[in-house]
Image (cartoon, helix red, strand yellow):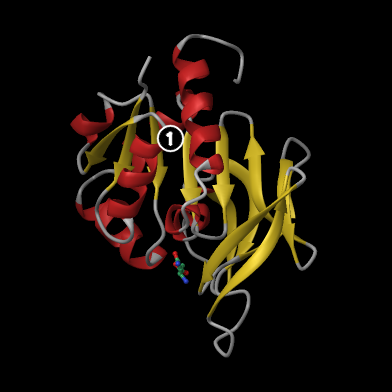
Amino acid sequence: MNPKIGVLALQGDFEAHRQAIKRAGGTAIEVRTAADLESVDGLIIPGGESTTMLKLLDAENLFEPLQNFGKHKPIFGTCAGAILLASEVTNPAQPSLGLLDLTVERNGYGRQIDSRIANIDLEGKPAEAVFIRAPIIRRVGAAAKVLARYLDAPVLIEQGRHMVATFHPELTKDDRIHRRFVEKVEAHANGESVR
Ligand code: GLN
């Protein structure tokens, strides 16, 4: 199969995700409306600016449809997308979809070191992680599986059917993380138990 992966295309870094999904064997579809959501098996919420995305979700009446989608289908949130998926957001607090039991601190690395490329370990092999005004995950729920860490904090997490990264996996040529999500969506669409 070629699972249909939506990319929320309201704002931010959706084009690079589209390319990465294609490289990882999925069909990429831009999602802008609740009707678009109905045609996809899984969704990526890209990086960008989470407060701006929240405003746009509100303007497009997409907040609730997205929340309902996530109750049944896999979502992968990267950077601002991770902030939107969390159950609690700090620095400052703001509303979120609450689909993963996580506390996320916005702009956790501070302004001085806005952005960096770091080397992380991804399941025994090195990977490059691009952080851009990234959040820090301060707390994970008991169901979270931490797939990678940087400076002691989790930076890639799987929780049930969802995934979260605080960095930008779409900006490197390494497609392992997108492939993992595409496979997860495919398994979920085939009714295998990924919850
Ligand atoms: N700092 C942004 C926010 O708080 C996230 C940055 C990103 O997605 N690269 O929404």
Q: Residues within 10 Å of mark 1 (few under 14, many from 20)?
A: many
Q: For residue 59, what is the image quadrant?
A: bottom left
Residue 161, given in percent of the width and then of the height, sits at 57, 29
Residue in the picture at 40% in, 48% down: 45
Residue 13, given in percent of the width and then of the height, sits at 33, 59
Residue 115 vertical position relative to residue 59 in the rendered view, above or below: below
* Nearer to me, 37 or 189: 189
Ligand 1, what quadrant?
bottom left
In the rendered view, does 140 fall on the left or right side of 32? right
Residue 131, given in percent of the width and then of the height, sits at 54, 68
Farthest-out residue, bottom: 112
Judge whether residue 99 can be spotted in this image: no
Residue 61, given in percent of the width and then of the height, sits at 23, 45
Q: Amino acid at mark 1?
A: Ala
In the rendered view, does 184 fall on the left or right side of 67? right
* Nearer to me, 87 or 79: 79
Q: Which residue is mark 1?
A: 24
Residue 86 vertical position relative to residue 21 in the rendered view, above or below: below
